[in-house]
Amino acid sequence: MTNVLGVWPENTHQAQILRLLRDGPCSRAELGDAVGLSRSKVATELDRMIERGLVETAGPAASRGGRPSSIVRIAAATRFLSIDIGASTLDVALTDGELQVVARLTERTELRQGPTTVIAQALELITKLAADSGTTRFTGAGIGVPGPVSFHEGVPVSPPFMPGWHRFPVREMFSTELGCPVLVDNDVNIMALGEKHAGIARSFDDFLFVKIGAGIGAGIVVDGDVYRGANGCAGDIGHTAVDENGPQCLCGNVGCLEAYFGGAALTRDAVAAARAGRSDQLAEQLARIGTLTALDVTRAAAAGDPVAVGMVRDGGRRVGQVLARLVSFFNPGMVVIGGGLAGMGHALLAEIRGVVYRSSLPLATGDMPIVLSELGDQAGLIGATRMISDHVFTAS
């Protein structure tokens, strides 16, 4: 398999240079310092990379004395594709070689229609995105799905709310259609990579990214890389049991964290509260629209509805209980909270912080911030292209 420019980095020095240039243009002298090469050696490597279409010059660099240097950047033709398949939305985006989003399209989707239908919808969006942006070739594509993934095979494995997706060849199907390298991972892992590349966790090599949305999961970053575990399901905290006598979860077990605070659980509890007349705001929304979602709980809590606020606090407390164990076990430098329900904001964050700081070992939490993601719904898009660029920017 080759990338669309027809080439891979020839050696580890070229791969290092490309990964450095993802953070922005550099002078030849700065690149030589960063990869430990002499001026003549880095010139040789860069000239070969320019000849092969991997990088290009971008003007003169500021003088450091001696012979003038020049600025180098990743080739402008580089285009990575990101496909973020969510529980109810489908996002596709193009980034340049520095992983800046240059074009994006979003549509509603329904995972229960099955992989063939959803992937066909994604491919239609990609075709439109490419036409609108004038893109004819992709350097690589990264894909996130909301369920467990066998990373090496590129297939979902028994995803709880994705019927028909078990072991469907997602990577193979996209690779065949797009004609470029493709990698597939759990959506939480790619969001964690997005935070590492461009988010609030950029300066941390060991951190947890916790997604709270339709599902709940944790991306575990160790030494700057995602830790996936032996079979790719590390961090699946949504199916940690928090009450052996609790409600049944979509995974088939009872008392899971998601059974209390995932999207489906919040919808269930919101409808029950509205029908029982315990929440005027939720009852009014149900009467007007005929349905409720977890986002309605978020809006109601923001408006001060006491029942909705109670749901947020209860959910935050349960998330905090699970996180407290993880923090004591893993000792991360930071915990980042993201996902659709992170829009519940500081009421949710305060509850999580309170439980974690009270329940975890003091040494683990002494200087460990727990913060909301600042990337929002771009975390997965950036992370997916970080994942595939790591793959493409590897020596052949």
Image (cartoon, rainbow, N blue to C red):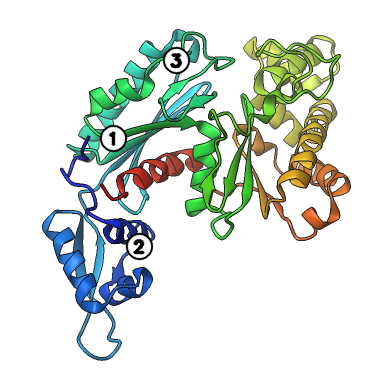
Label 2, secondary structure: give it.
loop
In this figure, which residue is indicated by the disc labeled 2?
Answer: 24
Is tag 1's residue or tag 2's residue first in the polypeptide sequence?
Answer: 2
Figure check: 386 above or below 200: above
Instruction: Tell me which amino acid carries mark 1.
Output: Pro
Residue 59 seen in the current view: no
Q: Quadrant of the N terminus?
A: top left
Question: Is the C-beta separation of discs 1 and 2 under 8 Å?
Answer: no
Task: Provide residue 287's location: percent of width, then percent of height.
Answer: 70, 11
Is tag 2's residue or tag 3's residue first in the polypeptide sequence?
Answer: 2
In this figure, which residue is indicated by the disc labeled 3?
Answer: 167
Q: Quadrant of residue 57?
A: bottom left
Instruction: Tell me which amino acid carries mark 2.
Output: Gly
Q: Quadrant of residue 127?
A: top left
Label 3, secondary structure: give it.
loop
Question: Is the C-beta separation of discs 2 and 3 under 8 Å?
Answer: no
For the view shown, which residue lies furthest in the left direction?
A: 51
Q: Residue at x 77, y 35 (%)?
A: 322
Is tag 3's residue or tag 1's residue first in the polypeptide sequence?
Answer: 3
In this figure, which residue is indicated by the disc labeled 1?
Answer: 181
Figure check: 154 above or below 235: above
Q: Residue at x 20, y 65 (%)?
A: 45
Near mark 1 (Cα within 10 A), the count class, few <14, some 14-19 or many ≥20, is many
Q: CA distance from mark 3 to mark 1?
A: 19 Å
In this rendering, the label closer to the viewer, 2 or 3 = 3
Residue 254 seen in the current view: yes
Near mark 3 (Cα within 10 A), the count class, few <14, some 14-19 or many ≥20, is some
Label 1, secondary structure: give it.
loop
Instruction: Tell me which amino acid carries mark 3.
Output: Arg
Task: Provide residue 115's location: percent of width, then percent of height.
Answer: 41, 13
Callout count: 3
